[in-house]
Image (cartoon, rainbow, N blue to C red):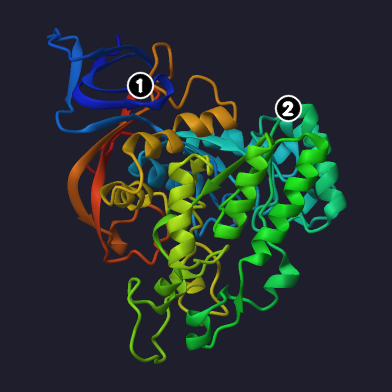
Amino acid sequence: MKSKKLVIKDGNIIDPSSRTNCIGDLVIENNLIIDLIPNSNQTYSDEYEIINAKNMIVSPGFIDVHTHLRDPGQEWKETISTGSRSAAKGGFTTITSMPNTIPALDNANIVNDLVNRSKTDAIIRILPIGSITIGQNGVNLSPMNELAEAGVIGFSDDGNPVSDSNIMKQALTYSLYSDLPIINHAEDKKIVGKGLMNEGIVSNRLGLFGADSSAETVMIARDLILAESIGAKLHIPHISSSSSLHLLEIYKNMGLNVTAEVTPHHLTLNENWVYGKKGEVPDYIDEDSYDTNTKVNPPLRTISDANDMTKGLSEGIIDIIATDHAPHSDIEKHCSFADAAHGINVLETAFSSVFDLYLKKSISMDRIIESLTSRPAEIFKLNKIGGLKKGYNADVVVIDPKAKWKVERHKFVSKSSNTPLLETNMNAKILVTIYDGKVIYKDGNYNV
Ligand SMILES: [Zn+2]
């Protein structure tokens, strides 16, 4: 059967890759974008399926370069299948698999297995990231060329930093052959010590061990120095502090080939959220006075840090938004703050979280969409995705900017629901997700 042509009609089409922001029609045939018609009065014959996008935003499908899929090895938290469906609900059509699976993605066989299973289990595109070191133990380099040939789009030991500076130096040197970025989880474990959250008034009031942001900035400083001397491509994940941002700006201004990402939570939440009162500061502390869903690495920082991250993203010093989607089951969060696992479940709330920054006029919609689409595609050299140009893959998302919804535990498509945003009212909703020319998600329903 001949597949129908698809028209997304009268939407506000925002495509930063072609500097487009207009009202118009987007025409899709088979799996490709075939036309973008501004101010269209066109009528379409029966062979077209029409999606009415009046008053909606039409964007390229989102790309997340930092997703923890937990598969293989921790399938009770998430699987390729549930992670990809959760992503589609959040408007993502391309996500990555961070390599801290069990076993880690440190050789071609494991990467091939993931790629093959993704073909049957995932409803969107999944791209692997390979380990920097074998078993992510920071001691011996993984076979980086073999991993590059297997299709990884970058290297990371995320979850763990590469603490040994000489190993990091070697990894950056080897990355020159594949021209793929090295993504080092920037954390000096010695500075963090027993730290469980950002050090400051909140950690003091709660009686929790804190660690200040120097733990991040020191490691970023080392990585910038090494990347500069080697000429390698460094990508800084989940930047969280003003001091790190300052350093990044200095090195970018010097012309270094460095890029950085920030998570929705480091943009929109802060250490006050650890109190478990949605950012309110309580008058007194009792045994219920913290929310383990706020435990994340790097930790939620101060209001001033979060504001600086937003400014840095808006100005392009920070290149992209990446979720660091880190699903954990209830049992890993229903415990003491010290025992709780690090990580927040982000894919389904990411866009609505950052949409609030747009409502506050802290950042433009074009810049938000660029940081979720064309810019990550550029950094990770992903061809024909992240834009709505003719001939590009038809990965598209339709967003209702006026919709309101509430984050509710039972509505999560992800296997986990570990987010401090539970019961929070959100603005803007993903209405339709189109992957490879097919409507895979619409109004809460999946077509695959
Ligand atoms: Zn990390």
Q: Is 350 or 284 nearer to us in this picture?
A: 284
Residue 425 location in percent, x, y?
23, 60
Q: Is 335 or 302 nearer to us in this picture?
A: 302
Quadrant for the N terminus in the image: top left
Disc 2 residue type? Glu
Q: CA distance from mark 2 to mark 1?
A: 28 Å
- Residue at image x 48%, y 86%? 206
Find ligand 1 in the image and state its quadrant.
bottom right
User: What element does badge 2 sit on?
Assistant: helix
Report whether 108 appears left or right of 321. right
Q: Which mark is residue 437?
A: 1
- Residue at image x 28%, y 60%? 407
Q: Is 168 or 145 nearer to us in this picture?
A: 168
Residue 193 location in percent, x, y?
70, 76
Q: Which mark is residue 387?
A: none
Residue that carries the numbered disc 2 in the rendered image = 149
Residue 145 location in percent, x, y?
79, 31
- Residue at image x 51%, y 71%? 332
Above or below residue 56? Residue 239 is below
Residue 225 location in percent, x, y?
78, 47
